[in-house]
Amino acid sequence: MRYIKIYVYKNNKNMIKDNLGVLILSAMKSGEKVRLKALRAIKTAFMEWETAKVNIGKELTEQTEFSIIKKLIASYEDTAIQCNDGKHEDLVNESKEIAQILSEFIPQAASEDEITNTFIEIAKDIEPIKKNMGTFVKRIKEILPNADGKTVSQIVMKKLT
């Protein structure tokens, strides 16, 4: 049987989903079993998100990718904690290693200075009143997808009062 490679180019080439195939293939060739397991977990989580009924018609964005991977990290860290009874040391180590590999895909959270500067830029277009808080938070999260939502809300609230 002959296989044909098909390349799909999307508008956003920085998305993790677009590079997963290459990363999985690389991990397979190099024999990195734990990395392969982590990459397959990401791929499975993305596929589950895309096929969920609530997400029909929605497109997987970079921000959504980050939130899915953050949930995976929390899940593996929780597994490491739950199995830390001395009997399952191999599972604990593997879960911690997978969580570490997954964290490589998450950019560092935006600093408070970056969030504040973004707020100031947005305030040039939108009137900085309390009624517009949701708009500010949404725009900041669009510009800085790696910003922590709670931190963004606190900074916006502080600036609007």
Image (tube, rainbow, N blue to C red):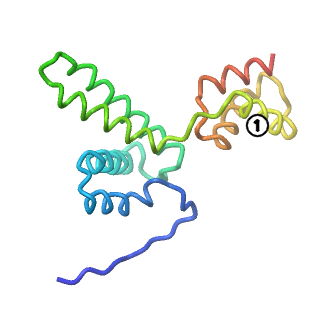
Task: Count neighbours of disc 1 (C-alpha within 10 A) and say few if under 14, some if 14 to 19, many if 20 or more.
Answer: some
Q: Nearer the viewer, residue 113 or 156?
A: 113
Tag 1, which secondary structure? helix
Viewed as shown, does residue 17 lie left or right of 107?
Answer: left
Q: Position of residue 35 (x, y in %)?
A: 30, 48
Q: Position of residue 114 (x, y in %)?
A: 72, 34
Name the residue at 17% across, 83% down.
1
Q: Is residue 36 above or below residue 79?
A: below
Find residue 117 and report its image quarter: top right
Q: Residue furthest left?
A: 87
Looking at the rendering, in which quadrant would you find the C terminus?
Answer: top right
Q: Nearer the viewer, residue 30 or 99?
A: 30
Q: Nearer the viewer, residue 73 or 63?
A: 73
Identify the amino acid type marked 1: Thr
Name the residue at 33% across, 61% down.
26
Q: Nearer the viewer, residue 87 or 71?
A: 87
Viewed as shown, does residue 26 lie left or right of 126?
Answer: left
